[in-house]
Image (cartoon, helix red, strand yellow):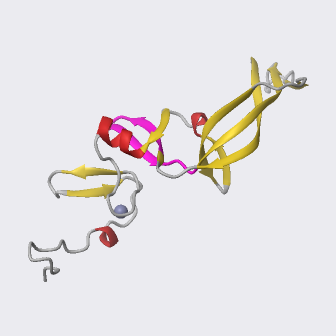
Amino acid sequence: MNRIVELWETVQVVPVAGFVNVYETDDGHIAEACPAFLLQQHRANVQHTGKIEDRTYRAKTTPLDTPYTTRVVAAIVDYGAMDPAEDISRFVEAMPRAEFEERYGKRVCPVCDKPAILVAALDRYVHMDGSANDPCWRPPLTEEGSASA
Ligand SMILES: [Zn+2]
């Protein structure tokens, strides 16, 4: 093993509304709500060398000098912390939800905004995370505007 991992530290969290993180799946693109953008500074590099098996593995952290290189990345909430979405495999980019829907079609539950796919046989959106769909599948309104029995 011989690789260098960049350590980026979040110095500011900028909440956003109406943005989604886009991921590529085998069934097309899906979107999850993007809660914020992170302003990060490249503070250090960690060089990993050697092998764990023969006990030659070493990790050496090299702090960088100011001024730090900065970047802005889309965030995900991961176990209560905000991490860069780009660390998740198959992340494509963050964009306004309207742009996503224009480009890929509406791929979220229209009721709760969870990632969802439209199942033609049901003529309904099905949550991709396996959560209950019933709360989002209330009886549709009739043309007269009253709930059907
Ligand atoms: Zn839903």
- Which residue extends farthest left? 143
- Which residue extends farthest bottom? 149
Task: Tell me what residue is drawn at x 61 percent, y 35 percent.
Answer: 87
Residue 113, image x, y percentages? 40, 57
Location of residue 137 (image quadrant) = bottom left
Q: Is residue 143 left or right of residue 113?
A: left
Most foreground residue, 118 or 15:
15
Q: Is residue 53 above or below residue 84?
A: above
Locate the N terminus and report the quarter of the image it occupies.
Answer: top right
Residue 16, image x, y percentages? 56, 50
- Which residue extends farthest top? 2
The residue segment tinted magenta is 20-35
Locate the C terminus and report the quarter of the image it occupies.
Answer: bottom left
Task: Tell me what residue is drawn at x 53 percent, y 47 percent.
Answer: 34
Most foreground residue, 93 or 115:
93
Q: Is residue 43 left or right of residue 88?
A: right
Number of numbered labels in the structure image: 0
Q: Main secondary structure of the magenta part?
A: strand
